[in-house]
Image (cartoon, coloured by chain):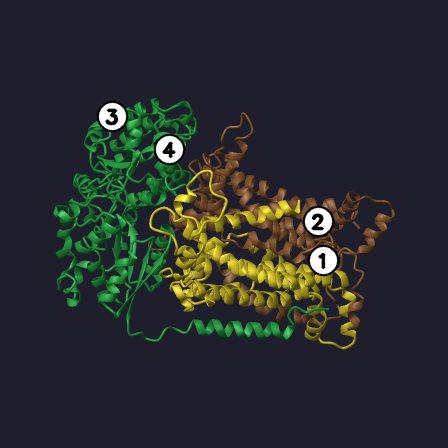
Chain colours: A brown, B green, C yellow
Amino acid sequence: MALFKESKGRQKAPLTPWKKKSTKEKKTLPGIASMDGRWGYPAIAPFFLIFVVFGVAPVIYSIYIAFFKWDPLGESEYNGINNFIFLFQDSDFWIALRNTFSIWALSTFPQMIIAISLAAILRNKRLKGKSFWRTILLVPNITSIIAITIVFQQLFGRDYGLINGILGLIPGVDNIDFIEGVIPSHVQIATMITWRWVGYNTLIFLASMLAIPDELYESASVDGATKWQQFKYVTLPSLKNTITFVLIVGTIGGLQVFAEPQQLNAEGGSTKQFLTLTLFLYNQAFLNNKYGYAAAIGIAITIIVLIISAINFVITRKLSGEGSR
Amino acid sequence: MKKFLSRSSFLGCLVAAAVTAGVLTVPAKAADPIVLTIWTFGEVIQPGLQREYQKLHPDVKIVPIKNDVDPLHQKTILSCQTGGPADIIAFEVPYSGYWRTGNRPNCFQDLRQMKTSATNVVAGVEAGLSALDIKKNYLPWRWEQGVAFNDSVIGIPTDVGGLQVAYRSDLFKKAGLPTDRAAVSKLWPTWDKFIETGQKYVSKLTAAEKKSGKGFIDDAGSIYAAVMNQGTVKYYEPNNTDAGKLVYKTNPQIKKAWNTTVKALNSGIGARLGQFSSDWNIGMNKGAMATILAPAWMLDYIKKQAPDTKGKWDIADLPVGGGNQGGTELGIPSYSKNKQAAYDFLTWYLAPEQQLKVFKTYGLFPSTSVLYDDPALLEYRDEFFSNAPVGQIYSKGILKLKPIFEGELQRKIDSTFGAGLGRVASKKMTSEKSYALVISDIDKIFKN
Amino acid sequence: MLGLITFLSIFPFYWMFIVSSNTDAEISKSPPSLVPGPRFMEVANKVLNAEGVYFSQALINTFIVGIAVAVAQVIFSAIAGFAFAKLQFKGRQFSILFVIATMMLPSQLGIVPLFIMANKLNLVNTLYALIVPALVTAFGVFWMRQIIDAQVPNEILEAATIDGASVPRVFWSVVLPSIRQSSFVLGLFAFLASWNDYLWPTIVLQSPERFTLQVALTQLKPLYGLDYSLQMGGAFLATAPLLILFIFVGRRLVSGVMDGAIKG
């Protein structure tokens, strides 16, 4: 169709800067004035109908019962903001906060670097067996978390694990306890998370990289740029938008890490050394039957994620403000 | 341009998926066999016995559904509100405290009101028996764990853990300790003597062995539960209310158990291998521990994990005598649609005869104390454990135990103490600090 | 470098194979054996025939749910995402922000109300209980909004409108074709999310014939402790079919992604 020819030669990467959060931008709305805006409502209606029932209802429920003490087989009693006050004073909450941030930092940033590098390597059109590599990327994501935790526990075992076995070859290094130690346990969990998601994110970066037109690289190499310089000045700037997206989504997910710590130890470890916020929430609801308190935790988590995402967004916008094409 | 899916095949797929999903959700036709759905965990319902019952009763189909213990607890709670398909539900003794209090017994059928039908007379279960009639077959204190405070019988016990010391006679010999089980049992009439023996053992280890983490006992922390179960009161004191009185701060038994365990932890006799971790499995094969405080059900596990150590193990008495770890109840939820069939199966499965079979094949120790006089149990010997008379040893210990009141948040409080001891074991906190943290953590549970 | 990546990616999976093909005793040796043992077929047999684990049925169930969810999410998200990206209507800003904000509330909290709701709608123990709540997700709409915003230039839409096309027609003929490969990627991600989900299915599915794979795998656990080889065997067999599928579908995935890149 003739309409498609005009979409060629696009210079942008598939994902645009995240516009929605900026209140300061006075750019005109990207909608088409000529199209009948009234189609907006029926278009989002099917989505919203289902979303409101299954996506929004739990949210409303949480906000509501956060102000109660609620036991499903008992009575609920109105509790005002006591749940929140208690939360603020609960040392477990602050420990969980520390753990969550630590794990998030350890897993998100190395993962991004690896994912971008991998995508850069796989971008090479002359590489043989492309579909094989791309399948490999997704293998970690389709393996069951429960099974993987068992495997990694063996690898990270204090006395007989493979990793300590290798570390033991270095003189003077003692066996590390990857469960009891605060940072070591975070490392173990972060490794599991990274292993699981790095391929997924590589795929996203790859899709974006492939949209960068070859002409840019050609003209860069004609100008005498090395591979690394091409990467730095052609690839990276075009990826800034994807990086933002991956970072935001990764943050939302990373701050809600739950399954991996839970499989290691349902209580988050003897000193709660790897208790994450979501695990803390889950335990309050399902082990202690304190649904009201759990809802309060949920709201706290939402606020925290919101703040961090906003910070992320502002930072990456500032960075992309310089030197982007 | 290659199309992966054309737009119309998108829709086609959706329709196909909807149709198939719809087909799968058509409820099964009213089946001729009665289907008994059992919510359980692990292998509380032994496959062998399940098959046997189905052979006896071709009109009954048994469907066990396994869950992890905590999700199972959640499902039981949820289904009590909404109804569900289960006809029999298993719950662990620590949770029985929860179900026995308040309104919660109403979630279960009072088994005093059920009577066995004649369907299992051939298999040895008389007709017309209610829960009260079969009570005498069971250990009294074990039976009590299934009785709600309002006296309704909500569960019947399955196995009883029991607890004795499984030890490596070959390693004992190497360390110059006696190997005969009577002699070994005499080594430690008290826990202090147990710790002393441990220290003697460890002193005989070579430096290399010590460095590789070998110890006398796999996990000194396991002593805590053992000592606690030798008392009469845990965290709640019976006071004629269903909730009992919280005594976690004052009960001297707790202090005793804690201090004994800390002493053991600090004396270096433990190999610091968490039970069921992969390091523990490997350690069993490498002789990393010379003793394990073993409930009856663990013996089978040892056999599977470390078959090469056959004949090197033996079983001695637990210090002080009498111990227990673990146990399950089976109950019938009040919404079940097949209560009679469920009750018939239950009473058959938990009858002494069947429990003896379970013991011989899977090592789970029966709570049917009538068996404890039975030569079939008393003379049963296990080759793997140097022909120790397992039935005799464990029943002896179990008979010494006294009933303990299980309160509502038993399990939660227990695990808090466990975490506290873990901190001491990994030297993260001193005993006093850790204990204080345990108490404040438990206070928190009740505060908010 | 790539070799290392492959190795790291595959190694845990390979390890599962080793563990499932050896006896527990073998596994507990240290250093552990790095070579598969002879027991794989035996273990595989146990898994496929285990009591209460209807493995092939679980596989089918998981596929049905996954595909239904993937297809539905793509369709609904595309329509809604288009509206958020290109149509002007009141409340647009607020709605999309609200939708994104809901991603920040942990889903575990929603399980109890969801169960009560599913019970009222008589969906408990049906595959619908897995499909219906997943028909639309905030992530899907967010993704589509970004994609459509970036890949469909306004000029084209205006040209089509001037030519007299109605909005639905514009959507159908102009927007959909240009987002084909990104739609596929979204569908894939939706499928994977459904494949990996275990918390909600464990609570809401009651009969073994309805189980999805992750739930069926939990039926392999023994009473106390772990039966490594059985569980690993189950996990291995649960991953393998998808892997094989990927290898075949992977070609299409690759060319889909690459086509979009080269020609657009």
Residue A66 in sight here: no
Label 2 sits on residue: A121
Q: Position of residue A188 (x, y in %)?
A: 52, 40
Label 3 sits on residue: B193
Looking at the rendered structure, whether the residues under marks 3 and 4 are on a common chain is answered as yes
CA gap, disc 3 to disc 1? 73 Å
Q: How many marks?
A: 4
Label 4 sits on residue: B288
- Characterize the local packing of mark 3: few (<14), some (14-19) or many (20 or more) Cα atoms within 10 angstroms: some
* Relative vertical location of residue B428 with respect to residue B353 in this rendering, above or below: above
Q: Nearer the viewer, residue B278 or C141?
A: B278
Q: Are marks 4 and 1 in contact (CB under 8 Å)?
A: no
Type of the residue with mark 2: Ile
CA gap, disc 4 to disc 1? 58 Å
Question: Which label was assigned to residue A14?
Answer: 1
Type of the residue with mark 3: Lys
- Characterize the local packing of mark 4: few (<14), some (14-19) or many (20 or more) Cα atoms within 10 angstroms: many
